[in-house]
Image: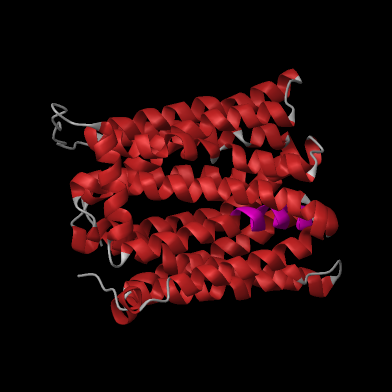
């Protein structure tokens, strides 16, 4: 178990933010689909908006995070996210909220997130020893899964009381609290010299490390493909549940509550699974489970069996995500030198989120052609490709410690 006041405050801040995010995960689709009556393409654009900044800023953010002290970057990015997300309920109360306005707000939100995520993934190795990173990531995942369990039900209930725009304010408050907690951490971060440093060369160095590494290169490409499929699948899932199957906001929240319970179980098992099987093999098994899991909602119909298939699919997805995430992050944080962490995390996340944005928009367009179920079946094929890519022997056998 990672110890220390620094990690405790970091963990608490992440937990508060996770609960807010779980509430917003329910409130945002309800806001877009039911309150704003957005089209399938508009749903895809809204889903993509907070991801697009990764394509524009991701590589630069990683390079600057390696130049700057990471704690202040994380603090100010959390403040920025709180302010921009807080605009949603304000605009809603003023009657100015439209899909295109929401896209602009989420573009700003995503820009702060680019720097925030590059900093947070690079700061953790300074708070705990590297041989404890899988455990530390697992603790954060377990908290996130707990949030995914309680947050969606809370979000569904809040929507019924105060409406979707005001419900989103919960995450804005969470980001402010996270900023205060991280700011209170006592951490001696070295000031890196900027003399003679070339931004372009630094970006290239991060990309070269990421894609030429025997283990991380193959893992990175598989993850990119996974995000492309997931962006499209989540767009199709929200439309399938909220329109085709006529889920209420409360039922949609319960769907993700089950996802959170399953993710918590997976996160609890993740350290033991990684120790016994090897972190690389755990990632491979999880990637192989994703296409099977998405097949279930793809065949869900407007009856009780269809609802069972939806819930079963989300349960398998949650279990797989809980097992995978801390083991994958442990691989990245352990195998990457500290001076490259910002660039490697920034580069990987930049491409991941760019492809997720492409997938979200493509999913909205494809739904108009093939329907939500046809889109999900297409996504199943792409998830299978991601599993094949990561099936290399070196990835399977990668262990930590």
Q: Position of residue 252 (x, y in %)?
A: 72, 55
Quadrant of residue 30 in the image? top right
Seen from the viewer's position, the closer of residues 326 and 3 is 326
Which secondary structure class fits the magenta region best? helix
Judged left or right of residue 255, residue 36 is right
Would residue 25 be visible to someone looking at this image? yes
Judged left or right of residue 341, residue 40 is right
Quadrant containing the N terminus is bottom left
Q: Residue at x 31, y 81 (%)?
A: 276
Seen from the viewer's position, the closer of residues 215 and 91 is 215
Q: Magenta span has 7? A: no
Quadrant of residue 393 in the image? bottom left
The answer to whether 42 is drawn above or below residue 156 in the figure is above
**What segment is highlighted magenta in the picture?**
231-241
Q: Position of residue 243 (x, y in %)?
A: 83, 53
Quadrant of residue 96 in the image? top right
The answer to whether 41 is drawn above or below residue 318 in the figure is above
């Amino acid at each position: 178990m990672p110890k220390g006041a620094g990690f405790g405050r970091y963990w608490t801040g992440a937990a508060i933010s996770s609960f807010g995010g779980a509430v917003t995960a329910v409130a945002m689709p309800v806001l877009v689909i039911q309150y704003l009556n957005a089209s399938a393409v508009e749903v895809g654009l809204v889903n993509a908006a907070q991801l697009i900044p990764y394509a524009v800023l991701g590589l630069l953010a990683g390079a600057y995070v390696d130049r700057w002290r990471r704690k202040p970057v994380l603090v100010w990015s959390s403040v920025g996210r709180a302010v921009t997300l807080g605009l949603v309920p304000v605009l809603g109360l003023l009657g100015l909220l439209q899909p295109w306005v929401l896209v602009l707000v989420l573009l700003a939100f995503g820009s702060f997130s680019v720097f925030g995520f590059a900093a947070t993934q690079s700061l953790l190795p300074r708070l705990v020893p590297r041989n404890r990173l899988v455990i530390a990531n697992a603790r954060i995942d377990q908290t996130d899964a707990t949030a995914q369990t309680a947050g969606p039900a809370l979000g569904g209930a809040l929507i019924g009381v105060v409406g979707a725009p005001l419900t989103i304010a919960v995450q804005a408050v969470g980001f402010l609290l996270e900023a205060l907690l991280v700011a209170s951490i006592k951490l001696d971060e070295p000031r890196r010299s900027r003399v003679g440093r070339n931004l372009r060369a630094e970006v290239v160095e991060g990309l070269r490390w990421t894609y030429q590494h025997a283990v991380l290169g193959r893992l990175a490409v598989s993850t990119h493909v996974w995000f492309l499929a997931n962006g499209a699948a989540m767009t199709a899932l929200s439309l399938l549940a909220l329109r085709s199957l006529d889920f209420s906001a409360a039922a949609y929240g319960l769907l993700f509550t089950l996802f959170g319970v399953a993710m918590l179980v997976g996160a609890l098992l993740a350290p033991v699974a990684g120790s016994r099987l090897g972190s690389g093999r755990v990632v491979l098994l999880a990637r192989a489970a994703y296409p099977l899991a998405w097949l279930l909602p793809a065949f869900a119909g407007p009856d009780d069996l269809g609802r069972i298939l939806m819930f079963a699919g989300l349960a398998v997805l949650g279990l797989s995500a809980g097992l995978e995430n801390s083991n994958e992050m442990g691989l990245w944080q352990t195998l990457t030198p500290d001076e490259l962490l910002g660039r490697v995390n920034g580069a990987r996340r930049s491409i991941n989120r760019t492809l997720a944005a492409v997938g979200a928009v493509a999913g909205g367009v494809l739904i108009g052609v093939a329907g939500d179920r046809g889109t999900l079946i297409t996504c199943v094929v792409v998830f299978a490709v991601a599993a094949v890519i990561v099936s290399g022997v070196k990835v399977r056998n990668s262990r930590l410690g």
